[in-house]
Amino acid sequence: EVLLVESGGGLVKPGGSLRLSCAASGFSIISHNMKWVRQAPGKGLEWVSSINSGSTYIYYADSVKGRFTISRDNAKNSVFLQMNSLRAEDTAVYYCAREVYSSRSYDFFDHWGQGTLVTVS
Amino acid sequence: ETVLTQSPGTLSLSPGERATLSCRASRSVSSNFLAWYQQKPGQAPRLLIYDASNRATGIPDRFSGSGSGTDFTLTISRLEPEDFAVYYCQQYGTSPMYTFGQGTKLEIK
């Protein structure tokens, strides 16, 4: 069974930092591009960041560029999101998601974790 | 950036009825690279449809997707109680910047 389990969320003051982790099981992340997607309370989904299998292609939403850093450790089957200079508007549930394995450059997300709540206040 | 606009914002129907949800893109979606996700309260999104019309693994055949270009539709042929949720469309395929629609809430009438 494919599982993605996020951790590291919590309450942080504006300007503070948090590091989110996403532990994968049931598959090897080395074959997949991985994503972070967030959802502010009562709001819709917002793509945050992507990283390819070799960490050579990394992308960020404009709203987090320069403040967030995505990384991965294929040996530990994990993905991370370092969040610095946090703002109130970063308050959200952060989901880790797996991009489907394919030959296409940017593809849909076939599995999602349950999310971890980050509150900036 | 392609903007996706979903309508209606809220759809009130009864079990057994047919639901039709719309997703309109601000420019043509290349190769129909459009997905639909279902999200229930307190849960993660779940993939329903990809490439505009392909059902994901394990998705019941009452769910179907259609459309091309800028206009896409998710249809639920006969609503079951567990189908009441929020539905999001998403475009992908041509840019590393993914966008989602704002969602349609399907509620019990």
Image (spheres, rainbow, N blue to C red):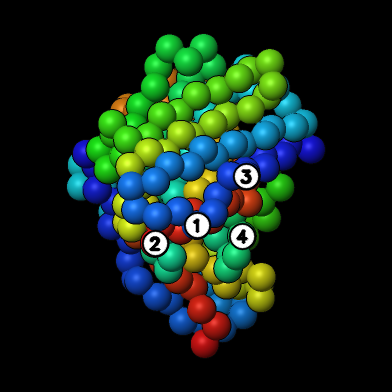
Verify CB contact (< 8 Å) between mark 3 and mark 4. no
Q: Amino acid at mark 3?
A: Ser
- For image coordinates 52% across by 87% down, the residue present is B109
- For image coordinates 66% across by 76% down, the residue present is B81
Q: Residue furthest bottom?
A: B109
Question: Label 4 belongs to which residue?
Answer: B43
Q: Is residue B95 left or right of residue A109?
A: left
Name the chain letter of the residue that bears numbered label 1. A
Verify CB contact (< 8 Å) between mark 2 and mark 4. no
Q: Amino acid at mark 4?
A: Gln
At mark 3, the secondary structure is: strand
Alpha carbons under labels 3 and 1: distance apart: 13 Å
Name the chain letter of the residue that bears numbered label 2. A
Q: Earlier in the sequence, mark 2 or mark 3?
A: 3
Question: Label 1 belongs to which residue?
Answer: A11
Specify whether residue B33 is in view.
Answer: no
Alpha carbons under labels 2 and 3: distance apart: 19 Å
In which quadrant of the rendered image does the N terminus of chain A lie?
top right
Which quadrant would residue A92 be assigned to in this image? bottom left
Which quadrant would residue A112 be assigned to in this image? top right
Alpha carbons under labels 1 and 2: distance apart: 7 Å
Q: Amino acid at mark 1?
A: Leu
Question: Label 2 belongs to which residue?
Answer: A121
* A119 is higher (above) or lower (below) than A67: below
Alpha carbons under labels 2 and 4: distance apart: 24 Å
* A83 is higher (above) or lower (below) than A78: below
